[in-house]
Image (cartoon, helix red, strand yellow):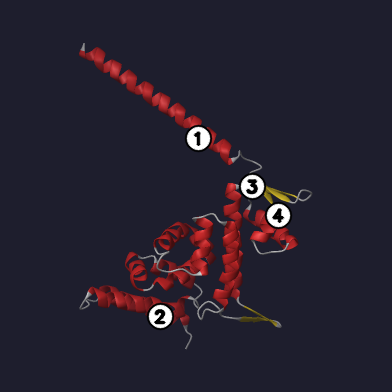
Amino acid sequence: MQNWDVALEELNRLKEVIDSKNFSSPLSQLQNRTWLMHWSLFVYFNHENGRNAIIELFFQERYLNAIQTNAHHLLRYLAIAVIINKRRRNSLKDLVKVIQQEQYTYKDPITEFLECLFVNYDFEKAQQKLFECGEVIENDFFLGKQAQEGSFVTVPLRDEFLENARLFIFETYCRIHQCIDIRMLAEKLNMDYDDAERWIVNLIRNARLDAMIDSKMGTVIMGTQRSSVYEQIIESTKQLSIRSYMLANGVVAAAAATQGYNL
């Protein structure tokens, strides 16, 4: 019937039954949770709030245990939901941790992309995986839903994924570099130079990033209004030394006072 609001309500009701029912064995309950997560894909990738709902369900301890025990391939859909959901960036760290734990059991281009980018900081390999991710999404039953735009056929979720994945690459690269060559960045984003430059300009403007573009040099300069990462580390180290010195003086003074009292 494709009535996704009612379907979501029934899905939540079914979850409550599975979680509250006394099963004959823990294995039976595990199997039912696994089936529920598979069925939920039909709803979550069609419902307007499905991206939030799938993250909430799959990250619940009992359901995450079911994924890691019985359905590692569901990590693909959790990863997609986290990447395209800007409001759930706080889930990224937990996702990467799970992907690392399961890397010897399950891998696909989407999980490998996150591992390359956030664990190994291998931007070249992340770029390769980004291309493979597009193909995976196009050929996935739940992710590759097509839409007609005039005379063109697009895959909206693929386009949204690639946009957010490029943003992840840009943000991560900028954290460890202060001056970035736009041509090199365009290669890492699988974009031509002009498209990459426009994309970066819009990103800086919309996200209000602390950065500027030097069109003559063809570079992006990060942190124009703040000190470099190295200066921040040095300043933090100085503050730590001062606090340590004050703490040591406090301990010495307290010890001297105690000794004088005893005398």
Assess disc 1: are there few (<14), some (14-19) or many (≥20) residues with their C-alpha within 10 Å of its C-alpha. few
Secondary structure beneath disc 4? helix
Disc 3/disc 1 C-alpha distance (Å)? 21 Å
Label 1 sits on residue:
236
Disc 4/disc 1 C-alpha distance (Å)? 31 Å
Q: Position of residue 7 (x, y in %)?
A: 42, 81
The residue sitting at 50% across, 69% down in the picture is: 80
Q: Looking at the image, is mark 4 or mark 1 earlier in the sequence?
A: 4
The three-letter code of the residue at mark 1 reads Ser
The three-letter code of the residue at mark 2 reads Trp
Tell me the tag on residue 252.
none
Q: Position of residue 20 (x, y in %)?
A: 26, 74
- Judge whether residue 13 can be spotted in this image: no
Q: Position of residue 69 (x, y in %)?
A: 33, 70
- Judge whether residue 217 can be spotted in this image: yes
Q: Nearer the viewer, mark 3 or mark 1?
A: 1
Q: Looking at the image, is mark 3 or mark 1 earlier in the sequence?
A: 3
Assess disc 2: are there few (<14), some (14-19) or many (≥20) residues with their C-alpha within 10 Å of its C-alpha. few
Disc 4/disc 2 C-alpha distance (Å)? 44 Å
Label 3 sits on residue:
210
Relative side of 173 to 217, left or right: left
Q: Looking at the image, is mark 3 or mark 4 earlier in the sequence?
A: 4
Relative side of 102 to 195, left or right: left
Viewer-nearest residue: 112 or 14 = 112
Label 4 sits on residue:
182
Q: Looking at the image, is mark 1 or mark 2 earlier in the sequence?
A: 2
Residues under numbered marks 3 and 2 in contact, where contact means CB atoms less than 8 Å apart: no
Residues under numbered marks 1 and 2 in contact, where contact means CB atoms less than 8 Å apart: no
